[in-house]
Image (cartoon, helix red, strand yellow):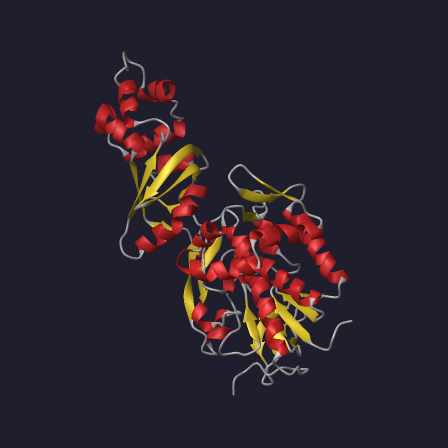
């Protein structure tokens, strides 16, 4: 039987749904509010290219993926680990498997399948969903206020509040950062939102942009400073996209704040040493075009050759030593990152100094936060979803702990005196 305690979870993404799962299991009456017409819109976006749920690497390495927040996430992940996530999914009826890269995926389920099962399970357990309700802040009594689809402002009496409204990337999914002024007005310190896991911009010629936008560069190695990433990338009208680009995007973003352009170096033949390339180039004879020769000799694709022509002078292309050097270390000047709205995820948000170890806002007792509202970032590879699941779990556990030491009321006064 549910007790009289009512908790409002604002945000129906992975962090909010996980928090609701924990709170509901503890016997609380839970109401989920979301600004969109359904839950988990950004979760569905994450599943478009194959739903990478988490990663199987050792805990210490996993935590290190959160950069400056590695120590904080070591504790967060200890509370709800990748192993715990897979076990919970199994309870939900979703089996997982580890791919060749160590990444973890659902075996026979899509993001839509998982979300449907999850939401239906919560509904059967008594969790109420309120869609197209945008959070507007607090009433004078301290209760959360919502702008409903009808245009009405509704007040919801709650004992405690858990915010999981997301960051500021992919705003069309509801993750639009509109909550920032509300919390800033209450003195909550917020780091500005910045794009991460995003594409980068390069000033292409009109000819190159027109003819090669959408073409892939296969099995390349990217270097920026002391970081590198390898794999397939895509030439776009604006610049470059793809996993290796996303892996370096945070570093590029930070460097752009100091200097512009930022040099990015591409190894177009990462499996072929420069000395071997020179040997191949020395074998060129007759009037065969350079493009055709490179295609036959080192299997250089058309887009890769065109990128060489885009960035190198005719004299350099004729010089075997210079050409070999560019094939292994091609300079691409990056002018900016793609806009925040296009980024896979965002850095910035509520700083960890503003929350207790249980993720309660120090300035607003009874208000907990989870997911990308907090100021953390991580690469793709399962770390983003795991971070959302784990912070949602921790915030919910913290809320339960707080309720044990706080007398329940029908309308908890969140606001400080």
Looking at this view, is 88 or 165 the one in front? Answer: 88
In the image, residue 150 sits, relative to residue 278, either above or below, namely: below
Quarter where residue 312 is shown: top left
Residue at the spot 66% in from the left edge and 67% down from the top edge: 23
- Residue 241 visible in rendering: no
Please, is residue 132 above or below residue 305 in the view? below
Q: Quadrant of the N terminus?
A: bottom right
Residue shown at 40% from the left, 26% from the top: 301
Q: Residue 95 location, x and y as percent?
A: 67, 45
In this picture, residue 327 sits left or right of residue 197: left
In the rendered image, the vertical position of residue 387 relative to residue 221, given as above or below? below
Regarding residue 11, the answer to whether it shows in the image is yes
Give the residue drawn at x 36%, y 40%: 222
Residue 327, quarter of the rendered image: top left
- Residue pictured at 59% horizontal, 76% vertical: 402
Report whether 328 appears left or right of 385.
left
Q: Quadrant of residue 220?
A: top left
Report x, y in % for residue 313. 24, 31
């Amino acid at each position: 039987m549910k007790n009289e305690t009512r908790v409002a979870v604002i945000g129906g993404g992975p962090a909010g749904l996980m928090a609701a799962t924990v709170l509901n299991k503890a016997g609380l009456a839970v109401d989920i509010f979301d600004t969109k017409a359904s839950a988990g819109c950004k979760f569905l976006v994450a599943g478009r290219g194959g739903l990478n749920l988490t990663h199987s690497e050792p805990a210490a390495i996993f935590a290190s993926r959160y950069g400056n927040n590695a120590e904080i996430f070591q504790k967060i992940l200890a509370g709800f680990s990748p192993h715990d996530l897979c076990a919970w999914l199994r309870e939900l009826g979703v089996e997982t498997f580890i791919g060749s890269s160590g990444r973890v995926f659902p075996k026979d389920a899509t993001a839509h399948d998982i979300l449907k099962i999850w939401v239906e399970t919560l509904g059967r357990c008594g969790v109420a969903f309120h869609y197209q309700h945008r959070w507007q802040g607090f009433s004078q009594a301290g209760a959360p206020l919502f702008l409903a689809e009808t245009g009405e402002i509704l007040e919801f009496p709650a004992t405690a509040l858990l915010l999981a409204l997301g960051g500021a990337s992919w705003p069309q999914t509801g993750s639009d950062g509109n909550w920032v002024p509300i919390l800033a007005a209450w003195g909550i310190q917020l780091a500005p939102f910045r794009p991460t896991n995003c594409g980068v911009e390069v000033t292409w010629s009109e000819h190159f942009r027109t003819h090669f936008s959408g073409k892939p560069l296969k099995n390349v190695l990217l270097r920026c400073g002391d970081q590198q990433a390898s794999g397939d990338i895509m030439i776009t009208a604006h610049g470059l996209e793809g996993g290796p680009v996303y892996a370096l995007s945070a570093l590029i973003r930070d460097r752009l704040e100091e200097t512009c352009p930022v040099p990015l170096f591409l190894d177009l033949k990462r499996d072929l040493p420069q000395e071997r390339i020179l040997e191949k180039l020395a074998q060129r004879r007759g009037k065969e075009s350079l493009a055709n020769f490179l295609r036959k000799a080192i299997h250089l694709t058309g887009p890769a050759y065109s990128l060489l022509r885009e960035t190198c002078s005719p004299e350099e292309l004729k010089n075997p030593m210079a050409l070999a050097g560019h094939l292994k270390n091609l300079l691409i000047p990056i002018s900016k990152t793609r806009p925040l709205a296009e980024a896979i995820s965002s850095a910035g948000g509520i700083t960890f100094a503003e929350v207790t170890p249980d993720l309660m806002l120090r300035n607003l007792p009874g208000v907990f936060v989870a997911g990308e509202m907090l100021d953390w970032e991580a690469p793709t590879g399962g770390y983003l979803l795991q971070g959302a699941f784990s912070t949602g779990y921790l915030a919910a556990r913290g809320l339960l702990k707080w309720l044990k030491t706080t007398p329940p009321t029908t309308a908890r006064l969140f606001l400080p005196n």
